[in-house]
Amino acid sequence: MRALKIAGSAVAAVIVVLALLAIVGIPSGFLTSAIQARVERDTGYRLTIAGATKVGVWPSLNVTLNDVTLQDPKDRDGTSRLTVGSVQADVTLGSVWSGHPQVTELVITRPVLHVPLLRERTGPLAPSRSPAPASGEPDATTPIIERVRVADGAVEFSNLRDRVNTRIDGINANAVMSDDRKIKITGSAKSGEQTLTFDIDATAPAHPGERQNIPVELKLKAPGALQAPLSAKAEVRLNGAVVMINGVSGTLGDGAFNGWAAADLSSKPLIKLDLDFQRLDVAGAAKGGASPAQGPQNSWSNTTIDLTGLNYVDVQARISAAEINIGEAHIAPAAIDGALAAGVLKARFANLGAYGGQASGDLIVDASMGSPTYTLQSDLAGVRALPLLRSAANFDKLDGKLQAKLALRSAGNSQRAIMSNLDGTVFAVFQDSAIRGLNVAQMIRSLTSGTLSGWQEGKEQTTDLTQLGASFRVEKGQATTSDLNLVGPLVKMTGAGTVDLGAQTLAFRVEPKLVLTTEGQGRASDPVGLGIPVVIDGPWAEPRIYPDMQGILDNPDAAYAKLKEMGKGLFGGNGSGLGGLGGLLGGGQDSDTNGGGNSSNPLGGTLGDTIGNLLQQGLGRSQGTGQGRSIPAPGSPAPTSPSPPAPNDSAPPPPQDSPAMNDVLRQLFNR
């Protein structure tokens, strides 16, 4: 009876202890040293457990470690480490008794992987590892893990010298391993405002070890960087710190790709890859970006372009594609060889298929200093201008075949800074081209009635051009030319000026000429000049266009001679065509009173009315509906009343500083 009482008391005590253990857990600080020794023996990394270690028995046997740090003992500054808020392992009791631990679930909460960003490649910090079993069989004491769950994880990249610190946050993942060694990993993460989701399927080797191929399937969605979901298959092989990815194949959206890649992660990452895409769509930066207070909607953005990350990875790559779309830019086909080392990116492209033509050249981006610098050498041949200019500068007025040579360099951390700091040279020729939405001849004629604001656009209007060419010298964002030359069937224009690329403004002085026959520029006589240079200045989206009156009224004889020369071109050297001026150019006047006008003449408008009447006044004659006013010779009295001269009279030349001529010019240009 006594023995039964002792046994009963012992059982009761055990029941009470087990009940307490189920509620509060077992303080198991004595396990810490054993766990630390086992981890360092198997991996070579030092495990520090700063928080409590507990063993619980409810709802299942579990071990919880709090405030855990794992790091390489050779890394003295501790920049490369893994910190974990807590690690909980649920273990089956039978596997513990058998000596083959089986973890049903491993929960890792708030892990943060700290990765140092290195500017230079150094020797590997690979820790010493215990040799693998000679037979290749796994260690019997290695725990089997069925499920791993990561909650609220992060990866932090930092460089103390450069004061760089960036993170990938919100890492949540679930990994499940089945009995047939199939591993499935699903999860999501967030970098800044960009989110990504991933889905990985892999098959673990029967005998874990290095240099074994692991089949992997990946599905990735990254809307901020990729225009479409990515799906890929590959064979992954681990060789120490080197990851080799062979037999890559997959799709990006509905375009297939294939190739290979490798990454050496022993210190500063070195990535090598060779990929060929059927179609590569890359999300482009938003155009504009300036707030209303900063300027027009299409002004350059002041948003910082951060290229610091180019200093912390080395890359050797070849990317080829049947078609590449970067934002609105379209290239087909494309082959680009690139190398990134020490923060300097060098890319070479040859015979890129760009908008119906070809582009070749070299691009160098140096981000090793505080402000990145850019150097571009490029030749364009037969490129269609309209889609190129539309995608590059949101300019859709000029079409044609473009031949160009560019040698440019710049520096800056934003679009505006890059455009404002441009230096170099540009030579461009547009052939068999057209100005869309604009009628240059009509615009020139409209200058006789006043200043124009903007390009006088019309959806149905077009100016055909045989050639448009210019060479520019670019200094601090100011592109200056002295040889602008525009030639078309009905218009010709030469000029010089400056384009302020940073401020997006124009400052040009041009000499326009009109051709009044369908024979165009090929006729024997010269085109007819407007007589006065034209100024184009202001924002390039909506500039002011007006005649340049500077100095004209100071020398009226020269101005009159120019107008008379213009009259000869318009109406013949003997002036016999003056009577038909209104009909030829006036378009809307009565043919009986103006020498038989033709309202269908493409050069109809106010130019004929204005110049015709004023030339008749300047020549002292009367034709059609207008009555001329004779300009008296010096010292002679003014006529008492205007009277038409004889038909064969010639107009006398105006006297020096004639007030009447000044008045004529003021009337002509509405000044």
Image (cartoon, rainbow, N blue to C red):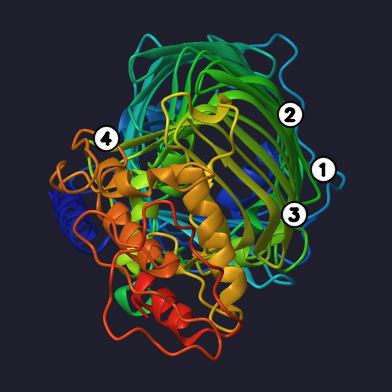
Nearer to the camera, 129 or 635: 635
Q: CA distance from mark 2 to mark 4?
A: 82 Å
Identify the residue shown where x is 40% and y is 82%.
Answer: 663
Which residue is at 39% across, 46% downward?
440
Quadrant the C terminus occupies: bottom left
Query: Viewer-proximal residue, 141 or 476?
Result: 476
Q: Is residue 162 above or below residue 142?
A: below
The type of residue carrying mark 2 is Gly
Sequence-first tag of 4 and 3: 3
Pick out the residue farthest to the right.
Answer: 123
Q: Position of residue 433 (x, y in %)?
A: 48, 29
* Location of residue 445 in the rendering, given as x and y in whole percent from the top left corner: 35, 53
Residue holding disc 4? 601
Q: Is residue 315 left or right of residue 207?
A: right
Q: Alpha carbon of mark 2 to alpha carbon of mark 1: how far?
A: 10 Å
Q: Which mark is residue 240?
A: 2
Relative image position of residue 205 (x, y in whole percent): 54, 11
Picture mark count: 4
Looking at the image, residue 436 lies above or below residue 578: above
| Of the image marks 2 and 4, the number of the one nearer the N terminus | 2
Question: Residues under labels 2 and 3: Cα distance?
Answer: 42 Å
